[in-house]
Amino acid sequence: MDIERYKQLAKLIKDNEVYKVYDLPELKDLEISLTELNPHESTMGHSHAEADEVYLFIKGEGTMENGSQNIDVKTGDVVPVKEGDFHRIHNKSEGILSFWAIFEKYEGRGK
C-alpha cells in the first residue's frame, strides 16, 4: 500500500501547524501511524512504559532523540525504540519529514 492509499484508509487524528498524524484503525493489536512533520518543527516527544516502538523514515531528513542518543535520520532509516525510552523527532529541513511509527496498541492510543 502506498502512502496515498494509507491516508484514504487511515483516520487523521492530529492536524496542526506542527504535523499531521494518521492512524490505521483496522488492525486489532498493532498501530501503524504515519506522521508528516512540517519543516523546522519537532514532535512533542514521549515515552511508552509498556511498549516498544519502531520508526521507519520514508521521506526527508532530521534528527531523533532516542533515550540518551541523538541520531541523524533520513529516508530509508529504521530506528527501534525500547519501552520507557523518551523519543522525539526534529525536522531540520525545508521539506516535510514523513515517518511510520509501529507499536502495540495500548490504553490511551488505539485501545
Image: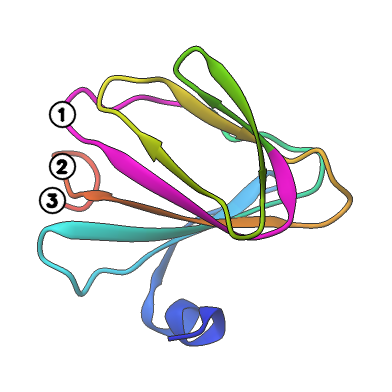
Q: Residue at x 14, y 39 (%)?
A: 107
* Mark 2 secondary-structure assignment: loop
* Disc 2 packing (10 Å; few <14; some 14–19; many ≥20): some
* Pointer 2 residue: 106
Amino acid at the residue labelled 2: Tyr
- Given residues 22 and 52, the one toward you in this image is 52
Q: Earlier in the sequence, mark 1 or mark 3?
A: 1
Amino acid at the residue labelled 1: Glu
* Pointer 3 residue: 111
Q: Earlier in the sequence, mark 1 or mark 2?
A: 1
Q: Which mark is residue 50?
A: 1
* Mark 3 secondary-structure assignment: loop
Q: Residue at x 26, y 48 (%)?
A: 103
The range drawn in magenta is 46-62
Q: Residue at x 21, y 22 (%)?
A: 49
Q: Which mark is residue 80?
A: none
Compared to residue 35, the image places residue 84 above or below, namely above
* Disc 1 packing (10 Å; few <14; some 14–19; many ≥20): few
Q: Quadrant of the N terminus?
A: bottom left
Q: Do the CB atoms of the residues marked 2 and 3 lie less than 8 Å apart?
A: yes
Q: Disc 1 or disc 3, which is closer to the eye? A: 1
Q: Position of residue 110 (x, y in %)?
A: 21, 53
